[in-house]
Image (cartoon, rainbow, N blue to C red):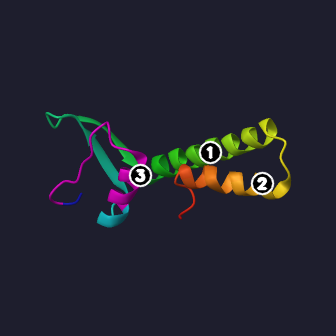
């Protein structure tokens, strides 16, 4: 355990979780309520599972967009890049 104990609250985003774990060099992060009651622990496995599901949902959104809009390949590629950028998957 690190000292002082590094925690997050239940409303933290997965981005915040990943950044905190990476910056602090930790592989487990306790989730606590406002009264410091431990609600659970997020592990590296949890964060990567959640991240993978987020990426897969984003890819599905792009595929759905392609299927709904029968545009030529260049327009579809540009559109996909814009969607991924808006979802913060690709940097700008």
Instruction: Indicate whether residue 81 is drawn in magenta.
Output: no
Q: Is residue 82 left or right of residue 48?
A: right
Question: In the rendered structure, which segment of residues is drawn in magenta?
Answer: 3-21
Contact check, label 2 and label 1, Cβ < 8 Å: no
Can you give x and y, in whole percent of width and height, for residue 26 in the image?
Answer: 33, 61
Q: Residue at x 70, y 45 (%)?
A: 62
Classify mark 1: helix, strand or loop.
helix
* Residue to which mark 2 is pinned: 75
Alpha carbon distance from label 3 to label 2: 30 Å
Structural crowding at the residue carrying mark 2, measured as other residues with C-alpha within 10 Å and reported as few (<14), some (14–19) or many (≥20): few
Alpha carbon distance from label 1 to label 3: 15 Å
Quarter of the picture containing the N terminus is bottom left
Q: Nearer the viewer, mark 3 or mark 2?
A: 2
* Residue to which mark 3 is pinned: 15
Can you give x and y, in whole percent of width and height, for residue 71 in the image?
Answer: 83, 47
Instruction: Indicate whether residue 9 is drawn in magenta.
Output: yes
Nearest the viewer among 75 and 92 is 75
Can you give x and y, in whole percent of width and height, for residue 90 in the image?
Answer: 57, 60
Q: Residue at x 67, y 47 (%)?
A: 59
Q: Is residue 73 left or right of residue 60?
A: right
Alpha carbon distance from label 2 to label 1: 18 Å
The earlier-in-sequence mark between 1 and 3 is: 3
Structural crowding at the residue carrying mark 1, measured as other residues with C-alpha within 10 Å and reported as few (<14), some (14–19) or many (≥20): some
Q: Which quadrant holds residue 77?
A: bottom right
The earlier-in-sequence mark between 3 and 2 is: 3
């Amino acid at each position: 355990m690190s000292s002082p104990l590094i925690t997050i609250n239940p409303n933290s985003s997965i981005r915040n979780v990943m950044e905190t774990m990476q910056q602090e060099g930790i592989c487990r992060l306790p989730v606590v309520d406002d009264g410091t009651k431990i609600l659970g622990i997020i592990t590296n496995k949890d964060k990567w599972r959640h991240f993978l599901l987020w990426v897969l949902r984003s890819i599905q959104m792009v595929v759905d967009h392609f299927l709904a809009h029968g545009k030529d390949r260049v327009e579809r590629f540009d559109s996909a890049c814009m969607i991924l950028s808006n979802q913060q998957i690709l940097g700008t």
